[in-house]
Structure formats: structure tokens, C-alpha cells
Image (tube, coloured by chain):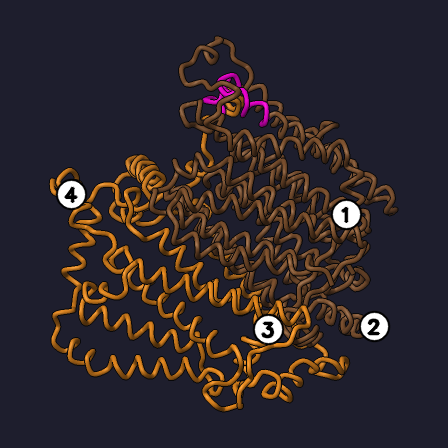
């Protein structure tokens, strides 16, 4: 009791480290395993990149967690199904239930100038939500950049650099004739199709998010088939951030302008155009282009960051790692 | 229509614009820009507050050409303006006081990305505070989720990675449940804007058969937000998340992000569902009980903690419990007490999270209690500020914590039901004793120096150190606001009551 109290006062135990344990199938002895496990947990706590050294981190209650997780999922599904059975019929109790969707369907074309009702809804009626949504993607890109972009802190020994460069050589398919030929044949089609989807968002299903995704896939194919170096000529860290910044800033300002004149009761000078023409729907087309740029750059950025820990070639391994590789990696 | 009506929109747009901009700047420029623009935010939210108090009315602002049930809308009253002002002040203080550790904890090339995330987080907080639309709330909740994981993981040590993975999973589960709740609510009412939802729910709820569906919709949302903000059974992620993040992130996450979630939930209760409908469901009663459990459990865990940051984080769990208890009382006085607690806790907890690392810095970078022995003598300024925060947490008169506890007591005594009075007063008493137990132990730790070694130690700092002007400024502002809230609580509670009056 006195000992416990003293260790409390001095704060000598760390509950999380005490609770965690790591297993590896080949671990021989129980005692040895315990000390090994402690060692591994400590390594992990200091260097998260060493996660590969820890096959499994478990808590002593892991098995109970599995059971409880399954049970609570089943419980939630049953409760939700039961709730749906309790829901009042559509429009039966509440005559105003379809008021909003009716207006979107009946007056959407006239009020927004967009034949595609979905585009009219997300970029005109409820544009504030979409303004947030396009920043969600950007936020995700920044988070991935923080995690994966190689810097002095998470590369540590130069050892991982060594792996990255080796991966680049092993998995670099840019010399592959089949991939190159097919890439040459498919790329123009993919990009043109993407642009078509992007520009026709106001008239047919599509728009910024889907068109941008297609263009992003095209960019990924390009960098896989012709090598990161070729892609780096026009898609490096700098151009990527400039394009994203300009698109998002344009989006914020354009939409802010529309919100401002709408709320202040000023006249909207942006023409709606004839529904069905390519220049129609007021601000929808330029906004779709901005969203498309952000989405395609984000997709390419994800690929590039997962592939080599940088966007384009902006982390220069050759100068950055040679001396450190000599210090750390080469010996092992 | 005054030009000030545009300010809520400008705060959101400016923050959204600042995010991508900071990506292009260097680390130092990003910091200076962020400080400048957060000062502008304080100015804007302050003028909205002054305007709404002067005119005594709130205003709604149509986002675009399409009015209420069809387009988006934001809304500003005294209450929203007060919360937004608080958020921007605490953000400014966290950045100025924590920049020292930002530079220490992360790589030079990623500091601008950190500010990018912080500014997007500000945008999300502002939008959540101003929004009049449930779905807009959800969209910006998503941004809040992602950015809060980002500012946690940027430290790149194992503890934060572990914490961020867990925080991410729980947060996404919370978002998913919240979205399901919105879907159910939309199914029942046919609307996404708060005022039309309330109108149609009022009609529907006259039919008792519809109550279970409404209960389920609001209940799922409540569970989602409870997971995200750390109510009783879901508080176990807090110590790692708050305790190991870089101090700015710790302060922002515990003081602002969880409050943003709770404010959104409160808004939905009050404006979208309506308190009269809420009273027909058991949700408020459950929140009351869980809040009390959270207060007790958080305090006991804080006593067991071996590390100062974990202790402060567990005490957050207890303080969140107070807020939910206030909402659970279900009277106007209870809501006012809960909102006051949001203010008091945001100011106090950010102060604690920003000063504790300075104490650790002069104690060979260890947050463990045995290393902190006598640290307040080595860094007197940080010691004094930490003491202020600790005394406020315990609930000593003069400080904000006392005023909020007093308001809880008054609210429940005025509220009526006898078992509730007993429960709240007993909880207030027990939790004050428990708070005192672990905070006074910490104060003794940091001031007791048996061998007089600390004073002569080489790495001690003087109280007035110009190289720490940012920290001094932030600490001073937070301490002054804390004392103001404690001494002149009637000014703030008057603003809250007036805000609640125009909240419907």
C-alpha cells in the first residue's frame, strides 16, 4: 500500500505502456517474450516508423473488444431497422415533408439555369455545404502530406530513404513497353473524357468531383507509364500548391461574392444562360473547373506521396541522403 | 441592414482562404499571418457581439439568392457571437504561447502545413458556430475531424500516432452516427434547416406514435457527438490525444474542438428540435446521469494519472461532464450554466495545457510528477499561470471555475425536482474535493523544493523574459479573462441569458 502510494506520488508507472503487449509467433520463452515485447513497444513509442518491427500490438483485453464490437454492431443494426419500421409514412403525418425537393425539381432549371438538378442543388441552392466539402479533400491531402512527406524528422537514419530509392527502381514500370504503348493510346482519351465530364456538369451527370477524379486517374497513369521525372516537369510541389491555392481561393471568392450579393439583395450580374448550352448555369461551370482542379491534384498527390514520400520529385534524395546513408544505412 | 451582418460570412471565408494561403508561405510568415488574421477575427466577432447586444436582436443571413427552406443560411445572435469571440481569443493565445513548442516538435518544412490545418480548423469552428443548417454543421464537422487528427499527428512520435489512429476511428464513428441521425431527422421532417425542422417537428410530435422515431434520430446524433466530445463512457481516448499533442494542439483540441461539437449539439436541441419536443424524450435525463458519471470517473482517473498532461486531460473529461449535466437539467438556467462552463473551461484548460509544457521544459523535458519537483521556482511565470488555472479548476472564488459551479448550483435549486437538487449538489461537492485532491498535489509538487536545488539550477528562467513575449501575452490574457469571468460573472451570464432569449 505504501509502495503504491509512493509510486503514485512520484508518477513512476505509465498505464498505457503497462497495458500494451506485442506478440510475434516465433517468440520462444514467456519471460523472454515479455521483455522483448516491452522493448518493441518502447521502440514504437519513440519511432513510429518502426511499426514493421512490431507484428501486433495488443491489449490484454483485445479478444473481449472483438466480441463487444461485433455485438454492438448487431445491436445498432437491429435498433436502426426497428426505427425504420416506426417511421411515419412519407407525407402522411407531415404534408410539408416534400416541400423542398418539389421546388428543386419543379423550379430548379428556371432558377439555376442548370439542366442537371444535382449540380444546381450542390453548387447553387446549397453552395455553402459544397464549399466546405471541397475543402475536406484539401484537408485530407494536407494530412497525408504531414504523415508521408519525407523530412529530416521522419526519415531519421537514411535507411528508409534507401528503401524508397530501391522501391523506385524495383517498382518503376516506366520502362515497360506494354505500359508505355497503352498509356500513349489511352491517356488522351482519359483526359478528354475527364474534361468532358467536368465541363458538362451543369447539363448531364458529372461535374467537378467526378471529372476531377477521372483526370486524376489519367495523371496517375501518366506518371506510372512515363516515370515520375517526366511528370515532375509540370506537376511538382510548387505547381500543385499553386493550382490548389488558386482554385480554392477562386472558389471561396466567387461563392463569397454570390452569398454577399444574395444576402444584401443586390442584383446578380452573372447571366444564367440558356439551359442546356455549355455556358449556362451561371457560376456552376467555373466552380466545377475549380473543384476539378483540386480533385485531380489531390488524387495525383495521394499517389505520389504514397509512392515516394513527396509530390513530384521535390525531395531530392541524391543530395539529401547520400551522406546520411553513409552514416546509417550502408553499414547494415 | 448594417454592414456588420456580413461579418459572420467573412470570418468563415477568411479562414477558408487562409488555409491554402499558409501552404504557400514559409514557417515564420505563416505564423505571423495567422496571428494577424486571428486578430482580425477577434475584431469581427467582437463587433458582431457589440452589434447584437446594442440592437437586442439576432439576424439571419441568406447564403445566396435562395431563402430559408431552399438555400443555406447562417445566423448570428449574442450567444453565437460570444462563443465565436471566445474561440478566436483562445486560438490566438494558443498560437502565440505554443509557437515555441511548434518549432521544437515538428520539422521546419511542415510548420506551414500545421498552420494550414489550424486555419481550416478555425473555419470549421466558425461555420459550426454560425450555421443555421444541420447539414452544413455536418460538413464542417468533417473538416473539424480531419484537421484535429492532422494537428495531432504532426508531432510524429509513436504516442501521437497511436493516439491519432484511435482518435480518428472514434471520431469517424461519431461522424457516421451523427450523419445517420441527420438522415433520420430529414426523413421525419423533410428539412435540413433548423427553423423549418422545428416547425414540422412541432406538428408531428403532437402524434405520440412519432416520438420513438424522433427520439432515435436525436439519440443517434447525441451518441455521435458524445463520442467526439468525450462524454462518460467514451472519454478514454482523451489522455493520449490531449496529453501528447504539441501544446497548441492540446489546448485547441481540449478547449475548442470539443466545445464546438457540444455547441452544435446544443443548437440542434434548442433550435432544430425544440426543448418542448426534447422534454418528451428521455435524452436529457440520460445526459444528466452520464454527465454526473463523467465528472466522478474523470476525477478518479485524474488522481491515478502519473503525468501532468494526462491528469489535465482526465480533468477535461470531468469538465465535459459538467457541461452535459447542465444541459441535462433542462431548464434555461441549466443551459446558461452549461454555456458559462463552456467559456470557463475553454479559458482555464487552454491555460493549463499551455503552461504545463513550460514547466516540463525546465525539468529535463519530462512531464512526470517526480521530475516536476520544484519546477515552479525554475520558471516562476509558468508556475503562477498554472496555479491560476489549477485554482480555477478546483473552484476557488475569484476564478471562473467557482462562478460556473455556483451557476450550476443555482440552476438546479431553481429548477425544482428534489432528487436532481440532491444529485447535483452532492456531485459538485464530491468533485470539488476530488479536483482539489489532485490539483493541490500538483501545486505542492511544483512548489515544494526540499533541497533548494531548483533555485540554483542552471536551466531556470526569470519571470520576465522578453524572448517569451508571446507566452507572456497569452498567459496574461487568459489569466485576466479567467479572473474577469470569476469576478464579473453576472456580466457574462447576462449576455448568455440575452443570447438565449434571442436564440429561438
Q: Which residue is mark 4?
A: A325
Mark drawn on residue B496: 1
Q: Residue A113: horizontal and vertical position, in percent? A: 56, 85
CA gap between label 4 and label 2 equals 74 Å
Q: Residue A309: horizontal and vertical position, in percent? A: 27, 55
Q: Residues within 10 Å of mark 1 (few under 14, many from 20)?
A: many
Q: Which residue is mark 3?
A: A126
Which dot, 4 or 2, sits closer to the camera?
4
Q: Earlier in the sequence, mark 1 or mark 2?
A: 2
Q: Residue at x 37, y 56 (%)?
A: A144
Q: Are marks 1 and 3 on the same chain?
A: no
Which contiguous range is marked in magenta? B369-386
CA gap between label 1 and label 3 equals 31 Å
Chain containing mark 3 = A
- Residue B426 as seen in the image, left or right of residue B297: right
- Residue A240 as seen in the image, left or right of residue B441: left
CA gap between label 3 and label 4 equals 53 Å
Mark drawn on residue B206: 2
Does dot 4 land on a helix, a strand or a loop? helix
Query: Up-down: is B434 above or below A144?
Result: above
| Chain ID for brown | B
Amino acid at each position: 500500500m505504501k509502495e503504491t502510494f509512493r509510486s503514485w506520488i512520484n508518477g513512476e508507472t505509465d498505464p498505457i505502456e503497462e497495458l500494451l503487449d506485442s506478440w510475434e509467433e516465433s517468440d520462444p520463452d514467456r519471460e523472454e517474450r515479455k521483455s522483448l515485447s516491452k522493448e518493441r513497444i518502447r521502440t514504437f513509442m519513440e519511432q513510429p516508423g518502426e511499426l514493421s518491427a512490431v507484428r501486433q500490438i495488443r491489449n490484454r483485453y483485445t479478444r473481449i473488444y472483438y466480441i463487444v464490437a461485433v455485438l454492438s454492431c448487431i445491436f445498432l443494426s437491429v435498433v436502426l431497422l426497428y426505427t425504420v419500421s416506426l417511421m411515419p409514412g412519407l407525407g402522411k403525418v407531415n404534408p410539408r415533408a416534400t416541400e423542398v425537393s418539389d421546388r428543386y425539381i419543379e423550379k430548379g432549371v428556371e432558377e439555376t439555369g442548370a439542366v442537371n438538378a444535382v449540380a444546381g442543388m450542390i453548387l447553387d441552392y446549397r453552395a455553402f455545404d459544397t464549399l466546405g466539402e471541397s475543402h475536406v479533400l484539401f484537408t485530407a491531402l494536407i494530412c497525408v502530406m504531414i504523415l508521408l512527406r519525407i523530412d529530416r524528422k521522419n526519415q531519421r537514419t537514411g535507411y528508409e530513404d534507401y528503401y524508397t530509392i530501391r522501391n523506385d527502381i524495383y517498382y518503376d514500370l516506366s520502362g515497360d513497353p506494354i505500359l508505355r504503348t497503352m498509356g500513349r493510346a489511352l491517356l488522351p482519351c482519359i483526359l478528354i473524357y475527364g474534361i468532358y465530364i467536368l465541363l458538362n456538369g451543369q447539363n448531364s451527370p458529372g461535374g467537378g468531383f467526378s471529372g476531377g477524379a477521372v483526370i486524376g486517374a489519367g495523371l496517375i497513369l501518366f506518371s506510372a507509364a512515363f516515370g515520375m521525372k517526366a511528370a515532375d516537369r509540370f506537376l511538382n510541389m510548387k505547381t500543385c500548391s499553386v493550382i490548389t491555392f488558386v482554385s480554392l481561393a477562386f472558389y471561396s471568392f466567387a461563392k463569397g461574392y454570390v452569398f454577399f450579393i444574395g444576402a444584401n439583395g443586390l442584383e446578380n450580374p452573372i447571366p444564367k444562360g440558356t439551359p442546356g448550352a455549355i455556358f449556362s448555369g451561371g457560376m456552376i461551370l467555373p466552380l466545377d473547373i475549380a473543384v476539378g482542379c483540386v480533385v485531380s491534384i489531390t488524387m495525383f498527390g495521394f499517389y505520389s506521396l504514397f509512392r515516394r514520400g513527396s509530390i513530384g520529385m521535390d525531395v531530392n534524395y541524391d543530395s539529401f541522403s547520400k551522406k546520411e546513408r553513409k552514416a546509417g544505412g550502408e553499414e547494415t | 441592414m448594417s454592414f456588420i451582418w456580413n461579418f459572420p460570412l467573412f470570418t468563415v471565408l477568411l479562414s477558408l482562404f487562409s488555409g491554402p494561403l499558409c501552404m504557400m508561405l514559409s514557417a515564420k510568415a505563416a505564423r505571423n499571418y495567422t496571428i494577424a488574421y486571428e486578430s482580425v477575427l477577434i475584431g469581427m466577432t467582437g463587433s458582431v457581439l457589440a452589434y447584437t447586444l446594442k440592437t437586442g436582436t439576432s439576424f439571419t443571413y441568406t447564403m445566396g439568392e435562395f431563402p430559408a427552406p431552399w438555400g443555406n443560411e447562417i445566423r448570428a445572435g449574442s450567444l453565437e457571437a460570444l462563443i465565436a469571440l471566445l474561440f478566436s481569443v483562445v486560438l490566438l493565445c494558443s498560437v502565440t504561447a505554443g509557437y515555441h513548442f511548434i518549432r521544437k516538435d515538428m520539422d521546419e518544412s511542415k510548420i506551414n502545413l500545421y498552420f494550414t490545418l489550424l486555419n481550416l480548423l478555425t473555419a470549421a469552428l466558425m461555420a459550426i458556430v454560425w450555421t443555421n443548417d444541420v447539414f452544413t454543421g455536418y460538413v464542417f464537422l468533417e473538416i473539424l475531424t480531419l484537421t484535429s487528427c492532422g494537428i495531432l499527428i504532426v508531432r510524429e512520435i509513436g504516442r501521437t500516432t497511436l493516439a491519432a489512429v484511435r482518435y480518428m476511428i472514434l471520431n469517424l464513428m461519431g461522424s457516421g452516427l451523427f450523419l445517420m441521425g441527420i438522415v433520420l431527422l430529414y426523413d421525419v421532417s423533410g428539412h435540413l434547416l433548423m427553423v423549418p425542422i422545428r416547425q414540422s417537428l412541432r406538428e408531428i410530435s403532437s402524434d405520440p406514435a412519432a416520438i420513438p422515431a424522433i427520439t432515435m434520430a436525436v439519440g443517434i446524433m447525441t451518441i455521435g457527438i458524445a463520442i467526439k466530445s468525450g462524454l462518460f463512457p467514451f472519454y478514454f481516448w482523451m489522455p493520449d490525444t490531449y496529453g501528447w499533442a504539441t501544446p497548441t494542439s492540446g489546448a485547441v483540441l481540449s478547449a475548442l474542438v470539443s466545445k464546438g461539437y457540444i455547441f452544435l449539439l446544443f443548437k440542434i436541441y434548442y433550435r432544430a428540435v425544440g426543448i418542448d419536443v426534447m422534454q418528451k424524450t428521455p435524452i436529457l435525463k440520460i445526459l444528466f446521469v452520464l454527465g454526473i458519471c463523467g465528472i466522478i470517473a474523470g476525477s478518479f482517473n485524474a488522481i491515478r494519472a502519473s503525468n501532468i498532461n494526462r491528469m489535465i486531460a482526465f480533468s477535461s473529461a470531468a469538465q465535459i461532464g459538467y457541461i452535459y449535466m447542465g444541459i441535462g437539467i433542462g431548464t434555461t438556467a441549466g443551459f446558461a450554466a452549461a454555456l458559462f462552463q463552456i467559456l470557463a473551461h475553454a479559458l482555464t484548460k487552454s491555460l493549463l495545457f499551455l503552461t504545463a509544457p513550460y514547466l516540463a521544459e525546465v525539468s529535463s523535458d519530462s512531464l512526470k510528477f517526480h521530475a516536476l519537483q520544484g519546477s515552479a521556482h525554475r520558471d516562476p511565470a509558468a508556475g503562477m499561470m498554472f496555479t491560476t488555472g489549477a485554482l480555477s479548476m478546483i473552484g476557488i472564488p475569484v476564478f471562473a471555475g467557482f462562478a460556473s459551479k455556483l451557476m450550476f448550483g443555482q440552476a438546479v435549486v431553481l429548477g425544482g425536482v428534489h432528487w436532481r437538487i440532491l444529485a447535483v449538489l452532492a456531485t459538485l461537492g464530491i468533485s470539488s474535493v476530488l479536483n482539489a485532491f489532485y490539483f493541490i498535489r500538483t501545486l505542492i509538487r511544483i512548489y515544494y523544493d526540499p533541497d533548494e536545488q531548483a533555485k540554483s539550477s542552471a536551466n531556470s528562467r526569470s519571470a520576465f523574459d522578453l524572448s517569451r513575449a508571446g507566452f507572456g501575452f497569452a498567459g496574461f490574457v487568459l489569466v485576466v479573462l479567467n479572473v474577469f469571468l470569476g469576478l464579473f460573472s453576472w456580466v457574462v451570464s447576462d449576455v448568455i441569458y440575452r443570447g438565449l432569449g434571442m436564440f429561438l
